[in-house]
Image: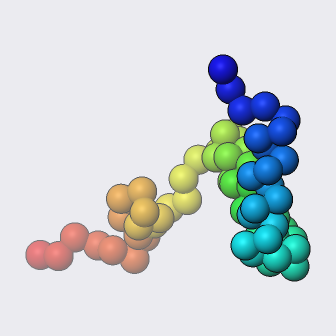
Amino acid sequence: MGIGITELLVILAIVALLFGTKKLRSIGGDLGTAIQSFRKAMTEADAPRGPPEDGDPALGAPRKDDEPKP
């Protein structure tokens, strides 16, 4: 009990009539770019990282020029 080929073709025909082929091409291209960017970000997030740089405020490390105040 799922969507068959006939139902899928009817839905796609209605969507094509509503949006037009040019708009669908644009949406498809944008969606492809978004998926590609997401996959790239996921592979970069899984990549091993080196040691944190000194003074990286995002990691909470003090900067070299920060000295304790008397």
Q: Position of residue 66 (x, y in %)?
A: 33, 74
The image quarter in which residue 49 lies:
top right
Residue appearing at x 69%, y 54% in the figure: 38
Towards the viewer: 63 or 42: 42
* Relative to 59, 38 lies left or right: right
* Relative to 31, 62 lies left or right: left
7 over 61 or under it: above or below? above
Residue appearing at x 74%, y 52% in the figure: 11
In the picture, which quadrant includes the C terminus?
Answer: bottom left
The image quarter in which residue 22 lies:
bottom right
Towards the viewer: 34 or 9: 9
In the picture, which quadrant includes the N terminus?
Answer: top right
Instruction: Decide if residue 30 is in sight here.
Output: no
27 over 39 or under it: above or below? below
Residue appearing at x 41%, y 67% in the figure: 57
40 over 33 or under it: above or below? above
Coloration of the structure image: rainbow
Towards the viewer: 65 or 2: 2
